Amino acid sequence: MIYAIDRKSGEINWQQTAVENLPHESTHPTGTWASNSPVTDGEHVYAYFGSQGLYCYDMQGSLQWKSDFGDMTIKLGFGEGSSPALHNDYLVINWDHERQSFLVALDKRTGKVRWKVKRDEKSSWSTPLIIDVNGSPQIITSATHRVRGNDLKTGALIWECGGMTDNVIPTPISNNGTLYVTSGFRGNALLAIRLSAAEGDITNSDAVLWRHDRDTPYTPSPLLYGNHLYFLKGNNGILTCLNAETGAPFYGPQRVEGMGDIYASPVGVDGRVYIVGRNGTTLVINHGNEYEVISRNVLDDEFSASPAIVGNEIYLRGRNALYCIAED
């Protein structure tokens, strides 16, 4: 199902059923068959359901095109989760699973395949990042065997780097020419990569500016806020904040009391960092060199999705409801 909801009132403007089908395999007990996030360019919304297809709707809810890539075979039936990445007219899907994995770029206007390249990868859940490097857009993907940079226009591999753990989920992030990739399943890995120097196999090269091997995230993506890099340990309420330039700690590991498991990625705005736990607790901390709790709020729901912030409004998608928190 795809819903368009009025931001001010919460009323449903329109809803569409993309597909009705029996799933070909299970999903994680804490996930659903709609764990992938949609993406929009402001004119169309691209709703992605992995093995159940990709659907393009206009803002009035009319289907423009759809595409089916087959069925994924995910490790241990853990379910799917990678979301599309959008850049100009390109829509990119990372299809990592236990059979032949691939990266594919579509024309966002028609859904036609522009190129498709095979990947030597197993199941991953990370969403690609598309950024300009040396004047040309690259697709950055993080996965178990390699972190890679591919040319957006051709799919050609530009660089690759080893160093992640199994079951890579966090999305890569970047700023000022530095890329940060993390993983935290049965090990810990955080790499800071200078993209201007990334060409060929850069494993253990000078293009890797620094690395960190403790308390890195399993499910949540890290938050890069100014010169501060925030991340959680595994799926737990233990927070670390590093200097993004050097890797030196500002603080942490710091236990975040009362949070339980955390799947949602931390978000930052207006000098604050918001951390949402699966038990319904949202912690607001000060953005700075020291750990300082500003407030703690609790909703009677379960949250796995990351908060979305627009203006002075925070949107939280719970298992039972969608919430908008805003100033009066």
Image: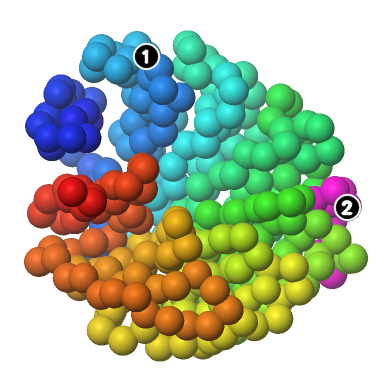
Secondary structure, mark 2, is: helix
Q: Are marks 1 and 2 in contact (CB under 8 Å)?
A: no
Confirm whether residue 25 shows in the render.
no
Q: Amino acid at mark 1?
A: Trp
Magenta residues (range):
195-204
Number of numbered discs present?
2
- Say if 66 sits above or below 232 in the image: above
Asked if residue 89 is positioned above or below residue 171 in the image, the reply reads: above
User: Residue 135 vs residue 249: left or right?
Assistant: right
Comes first in the chain, label 1 or label 2: 1
Q: Nearer the viewer, residue 187 or 247?
A: 247
Q: Amino acid at mark 2?
A: Ala
| Position of residue 157 measured from the top left corner of the image (x, y, whole percent) | 77, 40
Instruction: Give residue 4's quadrant in the image.
Output: top left
Q: Residue at x 85, y 61 (%)?
A: 207
* Residue 65 numbered mark, or none: 1
Question: At 53% from the left edge and 41% from the top edge, which residue is drawn?
Answer: 94
**Does residue 201 appear to the left or right of 151 in the view shown?**
right
Which percent across, then down, holds residue 98?
49, 53
Q: Quadrant of residue 90?
A: top right
Numbered badge on residue 225: none
Q: Which residue is mark 2?
A: 197
Frontmost of labels 1 and 2 is: 2
Residue toward you, 63 or 119: 63
Image quarter of the N terminus: top left
Seen at 23% across and 17% down, the residue is: 61
Determine if residue 307 is in view.
Answer: yes
Can you give x and y, in whole percent of width and height, for residue 155 in the image? 70, 32
Q: Secondary structure at mark 1?
A: strand
Q: Is-magenta flag for residue 157?
A: no
| In-front residue for pair 204/11 | 11
What residue is rendered at 27% in x and 80% in y?
260
